[in-house]
């Protein structure tokens, strides 16, 4: 059983790296942001509660986040383990997580803020299947259309300069201290997130001894 957390600023490739790791080791990828986006897209009650907060680039309340994480992990579909991304994002969430689950490692994707701006403002998302694109490194074959399902590519509601600035503030103010909590427990491997995805993945596996 392998249980990992992926942490990093927006646009650092958390989703991409989690997906690559899960594919190789048969782990389940749990993205808290994706779960919230699903609720917003499907107009659920929770979606209505979190839509504005998300669009502003602010953090959703801890109770809602913990409920979502607890419910997701209780599904126990992760026979070989999981990679959770986008959680925990503040001290309280980290404590909740450490009290309830033992983890094997925290992967910290390190990316300078200038590079975050460049990546995030060029990010597009398929409105149908959720696939991520980047107009710099990972362009779709047909402009504006998803390679996988043909759905329309859109900009995430929180990928605007204003929301990005808010998210960077949240990250530096609240999420970095979480890394310090994990560092004290010697869980953290830090990886340079600037190279291409395969190189970053190799570095992660090497540092985790996989
Ligand atoms: P992400 O896709 O991880 O960037 O998450 C998108 C948005 O979902 C964030 O900007 C928050 O509004 C919300 N969100 C995701 N994970 C969390 C979390 N652990 N705590 C609070 N809000 C979260």
Image (cartoon, helix red, strand yellow):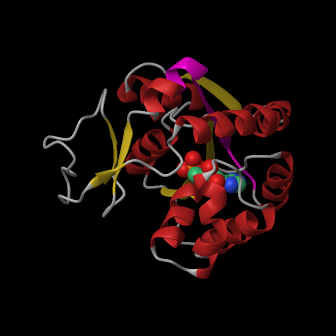
| Image point (37%, 23%), residue name | 196
**Could you tell me how many numbered marks the image carries?**
0
Between residue 182 and residue 51, name the one nearer to us: 51
Query: For the view shown, which residue lies furthest in the left direction?
Result: 142
| Image point (64%, 33%), residue name | 165
Question: Residue 111: horizontal and vertical position, in percent?
Answer: 57, 23
Query: For the view shown, which residue lies furthest in the front direction?
Result: 162
| Image point (31%, 27%), residue name | 136
Whether residue 87 is visible to the viewer of this picture, yes or no, is yes
Question: Residue 38: horizontal and vertical position, in percent?
Answer: 48, 68
The relative height of residue 11 versus residue 157 in the rendered view (above or below) is above
Specify whether 45 is left or right of 79.
Answer: right
Specify whether 173 is left or right of 86.
Answer: right
Query: For the view shown, which residue lies furthest in the bottom direction?
Result: 45
Query: Residue 97 colored magenta?
Result: no
Whether residue 85 is visible to the viewer of this picture, yes or no, is no
Question: Residue 43: horizontal and vertical position, in percent?
Answer: 50, 77
Quarter of the rendering containing residue 74: bottom right
Between residue 154 and residue 110, name the one nearer to us: 154
Q: Which residues are magenta?
A: 102-116
Query: Residue 114 colored magenta?
Result: yes
Between residue 202 and residue 162, name the one nearer to us: 162
| Image point (80%, 39%), residue name | 174
Quarter of the rendering containing residue 209: top right
Question: Residue 90: horizontal and vertical position, in percent?
Answer: 80, 46
Specify whether 14 is left or right of 184.
Answer: left
The relative height of residue 61 versus residue 104 in the rendered view (above or below) is below
Look at the image and tell me in which quarter the N terminus lies. Answer: bottom right
Between residue 205 and residue 173, name the one nearer to us: 173
């Amino acid at each position: 059983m392998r249980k990992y957390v992926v942490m990093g600023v927006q646009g650092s490739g958390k989703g991409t790296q989690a997906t690559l790791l899960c594919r190789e080791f048969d782990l389940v990828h749990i993205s808290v942001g994706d779960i919230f986006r699903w609720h917003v897209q499907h107009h659920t009650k929770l979606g209505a509660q979190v839509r504005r907060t998300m669009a502003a680039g602010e953090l959703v309340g801890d109770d809602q986040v913990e409920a979502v994480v607890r419910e997701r992990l209780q599904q126990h579909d992760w026979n070989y383990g999981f990679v959770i991304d986008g959680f925990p994002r503040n001290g309280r969430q980290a404590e909740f997580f450490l009290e309830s689950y033992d983890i094997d490692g925290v992967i910290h994707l390190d990316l300078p803020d200038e590079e975050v701006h460049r990546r995030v403002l060029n990010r597009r998302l398929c409105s149908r299947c959720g696939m991520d694109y980047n107009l710099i490194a990972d362009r779709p074959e047909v402009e504006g259309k998803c390679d996988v399902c043909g759905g329309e590519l859109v900009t995430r509601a929180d990928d605007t300069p204003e929301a990005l600035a808010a998210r960077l503030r949240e990250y530096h103010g609240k999420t970095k201290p979480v890394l310090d909590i994990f560092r004290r427990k010697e869980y953290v491997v830090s990886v340079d997130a600037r190279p291409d995805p395969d190189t970053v993945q190799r570095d992660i596996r090497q540092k985790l001894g996989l």
